Amino acid sequence: MNKDQLVEEVAKSSGFSKKNAEKAVTHVLDSIFAALKQGKEVKLVGFGKFDVRSREARMGISSKTGEEVELPAGKVPIFTAGVDLKKALNQD
């Protein structure tokens, strides 16, 4: 599902206009981005947790050339699924 499809689903299930559903989805995503940029975690009970972790510099292999390249240190987003999401995915 992409963002447009998500907006469509939100509009259908909430009764919002497509324009208002797009605003809502955009604001939620922007809020998650902002919190993560500030180093905060975002917990959505039952769904999961978004967090940021630091990654040290390391050596990797270029997929184009096969040569070793140094990958710089940086921050990476992490998502951990919540219990309810895990249960929902494993129901038949």
Image: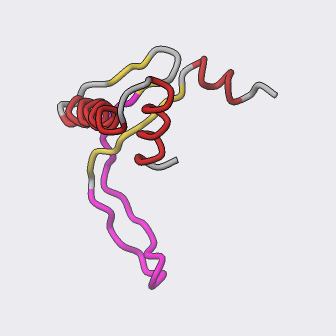
Q: Quadrant of residue 65?
A: bottom left
Q: Is residue 75 left or right of residue 66?
A: left
Observer-nearest of 29 and 33: 29
Q: Say above or below: 68 vs 51.
A: below
Query: Image check: 66 left or right of 86?
Result: left
Would you say residue 22 sits in the magenta stretch? no
Res 19 → quadrant? top left
Q: Is residue 53 among what the camera can see?
A: no
Compared to residue 80, the image places residue 62 above or below, namely: below
**Corner quadrant of residue 27:** top left
Q: Which residues are magenta?
A: 50-72
Most distant residue in the right direction: 92
Camera-nearest residue between 72 and 13: 13
Give the prevailing secondary structure in the magenta stretch.
strand
Check residue 68 for magenta coloring. yes
> What's the residue at 64%, 25% (across, down)?
86
Rendered location of residue 22, percent (x, y): 32, 38
x then y, percent, for residue 47: 51, 22
Pinpoint residue 20: horizontal percent, then vertical percent. 29, 32
| Residue positioned 27% across, 35% down in the render | 23
> Which residue appears at 20% of the width and 37% of the height?
37
- Residue in view at x 39 percent, y 64 percent: 59
Q: As displayed, is residue 89 above or below residue 7?
A: above
| Image color mode | secondary structure
Residue 28: percent from left, percent from top: 30, 30
* Circle count: 0
State the quadrant of the C terminus: top right
The answer to whether one can see residue 90 in this image is yes
